[in-house]
Image: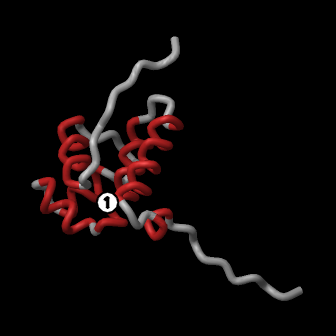
Amino acid sequence: MAKTATTRYDVAEHLRTQEEMAAYLEACLEAADGDAAFIAKALGDIARAKGMAQVARDAGLSRESLYKALSGERSPGFDTILKVIGALGLKLHAGAGQT
């Protein structure tokens, strides 16, 4: 049987527009179930799509610290999240949820 060549899927390669990035973050926020590291990883995916070095400059962070903060291995501080969201050109919205 012939082997099938596969490549690793990278969502960052498919986030091309601000609308796609916002929709991806919205979907991740809904699916996160309170997991802050999951949201950090989603922001990391978006930052890679935009260019990590540029996002780091715009957020006022070093590239290395941004990679660590958005790796999904830990939960970054909320101030870091807000800086990254702003640097990505996205907005954080609140809405009434179901109880």
Q: How many marks?
A: 1
Q: Amino acid at mark 1?
A: Ala
Camera-side residue: 63 or 83?
83
Where residue 96 sits: x, y (%)? Answer: 41, 19
**Which residue occupies 35% across, 57% down?**
18
**Quick check: 61 left or right of 67?**
left
Where residue 93 sits: x, y (%)? Answer: 32, 33
Where residue 77 sits: x, y (%)? Answer: 23, 37
Outermost bottom residue: 2
Quarter of the rendering containing residue 37: top left
Quadrant (top left/top right/bottom left/bottom right) for the N terminus? bottom right
Residue receiving disc 1: 47
**Which residue occupies 56% across, 68% down?**
9
**Which residue occupies 41% across, 50% down?**
42
Where residue 25 sits: x, y (%)? Answer: 42, 46
Q: Is residue 88 above or below residue 81?
A: below
Label 1 CA crowd tier, 10 Å (few <14, some 14–19, many 20+): many
Camera-side residue: 14 or 74?
14
Is label 1 in a helix, a strand or a loop?
Answer: helix
